[in-house]
Amino acid sequence: MAEWEKEIAELKTDVKYIREDISIMQKQVRDLNKASHMGAGGLKVFLLIGGLLGAIWDFYKINLKEEL
């Protein structure tokens, strides 16, 4: 086997590893996007629950003042 054939075989191997690395990185990016979207959804739920609790508390305080 000639020297240039060895170099081409080595380059093909390098390209194969680079492609595998790229696919792993793409999967990690997808996972990060999924996690960040889930985190944003969780914050929205906490805001909704906090708003509901605040409304109940205000309603309770208003009714308490009317009784006094």
Image: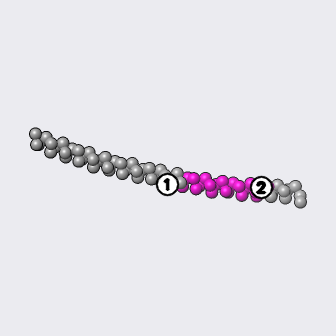
Measured Cα–Cα span from mark 1 to mark 2: 35 Å
Nearer mark to the viewer, of 1 and 2:
1
Horizontal arrangement in the rendering, residue 59 relative to residue 9 (left or right):
left
Q: Is residue 57 magenta?
A: no
Horizontal arrangement in the rendering, residue 40 relative to residue 20 (left or right):
left
Given the image, on which type of amino acid does mark 2 rest? Leu
The residue sitting at 53% across, 54% down in the picture is 31
Question: Which element type, helix, strand or loop, lies under badge 1?
Answer: helix
Give the residue at mark 1.
Answer: 34
Given the image, on which type of amino acid does mark 1 rest? Lys
Horizontal arrangement in the rendering, residue 45 relative to residue 13 (left or right):
left
Q: Which residues are magenta?
A: 10-30
Give the residue at mark 2.
Answer: 11
User: Does the CB distance between marks 1 and 2 fall below 8 Å?
Assistant: no
The residue sitting at 87% across, 55% down in the picture is 3
Residue density around tag 1, few if under 14, some if 14–19, many if 20 or more, within 10 Å: few
The residue sitting at 47% across, 50% down in the picture is 36
- Relative height, residue 31 to residue 68 (above, below): below
State the residue in front, 68 or 38: 68
- Relative height, residue 3 to residue 68 (above, below): below
- Quadrant of the frame with the C terminus: top left
Colour theme:
one colour
Relative image position of residue 21 (x, y in whole percent): 66, 53
The residue sitting at 23% across, 44% down in the picture is 57
Majority secondary structure of magenta residues: helix
Relative image position of residue 42 (x, y in whole percent): 40, 50
Relative image position of residue 13 (x, y in whole percent): 76, 57
Horizontal arrangement in the rendering, residue 63 relative to residue 35 (left or right):
left
| Disc nearer the start of the sequence (1/2) | 2
Q: Is residue 26 magenta?
A: yes
